[in-house]
């Protein structure tokens, strides 16, 4: 029965699934050619380690799903592994919950730190590799922009009825008093839009804006205003000097590398924005079979970019 299934497999990309005698899914794999990949398990057994030999000895049933491309097969494989957690598959699990910054969905939105990702709550940025890294970004945003920190419900009705009074944050210059209607919502949202660039790691856009505003104010002899933007520019430049800059020419990329032994694989993941490392993570993976580095790496790239919401257009690895 199993032998007949193997001989009838198509020479096409897809995902294969192995089941044991209890009908339990024990392994999910992807292949550029289902026929060649699955056949190799049963024709090259002498080349495998004990774990792979044990897997093969337990296989009673085979199922497969065709895919249009090898990349589609990778996506399907990844989803099936996460859903079913077969005992012979590597799982890129990490119990550590990383911190995020979130622009809340509300009038006069706040920017908060959180370890919980709830999509409907707001727009998330991160995750950050440490609380310290996150706090340094949040501190920069609060130095450059007047973002409220209170949790007041700033509806039109509450503001018009004068339900709130400005707090200490207003008196020390950290807030412009939207709770009393002292700051227009459009002006506040402009500051949020600027802050969003920083949270995305696009510091050069903000830097260019501050520099142009400083120059314009100086040309118009508004020296106090020019000094205001000079202060902001210096804060931004000081923050950038503390960032770990790799190479400005690299722009926005992900770097994923692997080193392995017979039993373990070690993954290093870097997110780089405008040449600076904004996030890093290391993973140690226990091999369940004799998976090649290329297979582990392809799964790691997909999983890490999804988990950490990377939209960088390029990925560099140390394997082809």
Image (cartoon, grey):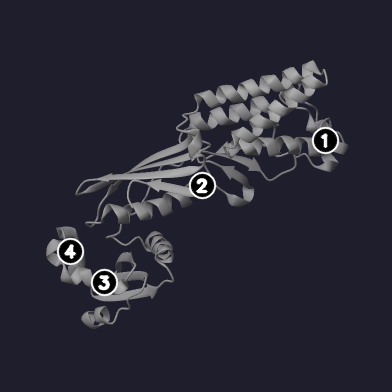
What percent of the width, then of the height, locates residue 220? 83, 21
Q: Earlier in the sequence, mark 1 or mark 3?
A: 3
The residue most toward the right is 161
Foreground mark, 3 or 4?
A: 3
Question: CA gap, disc 4 to disc 2?
Answer: 40 Å
Observer-nearest residue: 288 or 300? 300
- Badge 1 local density, few (<14 within 10 Å), some, or many (20+)? few
- Identify the residue shown where x is 22% and y is 56%: 290
- Look at the picture and state if 91 lies above or below 221: below
Question: CA gap, disc 3 to disc 4?
Answer: 20 Å
Observer-nearest residue: 208 or 27? 208
Residue holding disc 4: 54
Foreground mark, 2 or 1?
A: 2
Question: CA gap, disc 1 to disc 3?
Answer: 66 Å
Left or right, 264 with reference to 66: left
What percent of the width, then of the height, locates residue 162? 86, 33
- Badge 3 local density, few (<14 within 10 Å), some, or many (20+)? some
Element at badge 4? Answer: helix
- Identify the residue shown where x is 37% and y is 51%: 300
What percent of the width, then of the height, locates residue 44? 16, 67
Left or right, 55 with reference to 10: left
Residue holding disc 3: 36
Q: Earlier in the sequence, mark 3 or mark 4?
A: 3
Question: CA gap, disc 2 to disc 1?
Answer: 35 Å
Q: Earlier in the sequence, mark 4 or mark 2?
A: 4
Left or right, 43 with reference to 232: left
**Is any atom of residue 44 visible in this view?**
yes
**Is any atom of residue 111 visible in this view?**
no
Residue holding disc 1: 184
Element at badge 3? Answer: helix
The reply to whether callout 2 and callout 3 are in contact (CB within 8 Å) is no
């Amino acid at each position: 029965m199993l032998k007949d299934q193997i001989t009838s497999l198509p020479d096409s990309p897809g995902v294969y699934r192995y089941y044991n005698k209890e009908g339990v899914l024990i392994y999910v794999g992807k292949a550029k050619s289902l026929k060649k990949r699955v056949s190799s398990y049963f024709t090259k057994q002498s080349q495998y380690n004990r774990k792979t030999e044990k897997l093969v000895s337990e296989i009673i049933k085979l199922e497969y799903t065709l895919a249009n491309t090898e990349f589609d097969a990778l996506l399907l494989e990844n989803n099936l592994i996460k859903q079913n957690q077969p005992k012979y598959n590597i799982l890129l699990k990490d119990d550590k919950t990383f911190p995020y910054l979130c622009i809340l969905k509300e009038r006069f939105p706040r920017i908060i730190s959180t370890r919980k990702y709830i999509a409907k709550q707001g727009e998330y940025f991160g995750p950050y590799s440490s609380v310290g890294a996150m706090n340094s970004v949040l501190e920069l945003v609060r130095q450059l922009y007047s973002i409220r920190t209170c949790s007041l419900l700033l509806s039109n009705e509450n503001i018009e009825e004068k339900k709130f009074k400005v707090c200490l944050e207003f008196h020390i210059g950290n807030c412009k008093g939207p709770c009393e209607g002292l700051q227009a919502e459009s002006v506040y949202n402009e500051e949020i839009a600027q802050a969003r660039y920083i949270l995305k790691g696009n510091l050069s856009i903000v830097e260019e804006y501050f520099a142009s505003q400083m120059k314009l104010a100086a040309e118009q002899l508004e020296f106090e205003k020019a000094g205001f933007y000079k202060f902001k520019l210096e804060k931004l430049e000081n923050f950038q000097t503390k960032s770990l800059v790799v190479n400005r020419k690299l722009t926005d990329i992900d770097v994923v590398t692997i080193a392995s032994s017979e039993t373990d694989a070690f993954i290093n993941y870097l997110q780089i924005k405008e040449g600076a490392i904004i996030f890093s993570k290391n993973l140690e993976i226990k091999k369940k079979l004799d998976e090649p580095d290329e297979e582990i790496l392809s799964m790691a790239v997909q999983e890490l970019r999804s988990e950490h919401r990377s939209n960088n257009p390029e990925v560099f690895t140390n394997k082809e």
